[in-house]
Image (cartoon, rainbow, N blue to C red):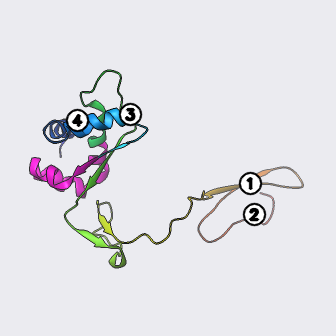
Amino acid sequence: APQNRDLTERFIEFYRNYYREEIGTLAQQYPKEKRSLHIDYDDLYRFDSELADDYITKPGQFQECAEEALRLFDLPADVKLGQAHVRMRNLPEAVDIRNLRVNDDHIGTLMSVQGIVRKATDVRPKITEAAFECQRCGTMSYIPQGDGGFQEPHECQ
């Protein structure tokens, strides 16, 4: 398996050949107007088909290397793309959201999902652990919270 440093070098080479201008624009507009470099799957496939295929099957490792390559890309001294993201578009096949059934083939792979957004709500915090203070003795109890409703302690721990 290729090492992360080798993968990062491949992405730097890919950017030099295909995305030099886009990275220049990103550097000028980062972080106020733009925060991501959008790369086309077909460009990556033309550059290195194995790299493109592996990006889909191991997205975590390859995304990390692609973003590290972006940070290491030769830019003016005063520009740092520390939190910039790399977004892959134009994946080979899109799954219709109505037909999406997460199965073993989909877990851990990069997928394109096609559909219509009908409603967007605010992001709400999710409680993963709740702290309770006993009214009698002041002892704190920490109760893990799941998706099945709010769990409270029945008695002092």
Which residues fall within the magenta stretch? Answer: 38-64
Q: Residue 141 shows which numbered tag?
A: 1
Q: Which residue is mark 4?
A: 5
Residue drawn 46% across and 72% down?
118
Q: Position of residue 122 (x, y in %)?
A: 57, 60
Q: Position of residue 127 (x, y in %)?
A: 63, 58
The amino acid on which the numbered mark 3 sits, given as a three-letter code, is Gly
Residue drawn 88% across and 51% down?
137
Residue nearest the viewer, comparing 152 with 14: 14
User: SS of the residue at dot 4?
Assistant: helix
Residue drawn 33% across and 65% down?
107
The amino acid on which the numbered mark 1 sits, given as a three-letter code, is Ser
Q: Which residue is mark 3?
A: 82
Tell me whether circle 3 and circle 4 mark residues in contact (CB < 8 Å).
no
User: SS of the residue at dot 3?
Assistant: loop
Residue 79 located within the stretch drawn in magenta = no
Of labels 3 and 4, earlier in sequence is 4
Rendered view: 150 above or below 8: below
Of labels 3 and 1, earlier in sequence is 3
Residue nearest the viewer, comparing 52 with 137: 52
User: SS of the residue at dot 2?
Assistant: loop
Q: Is residue 23 left or right of residue 150?
A: left
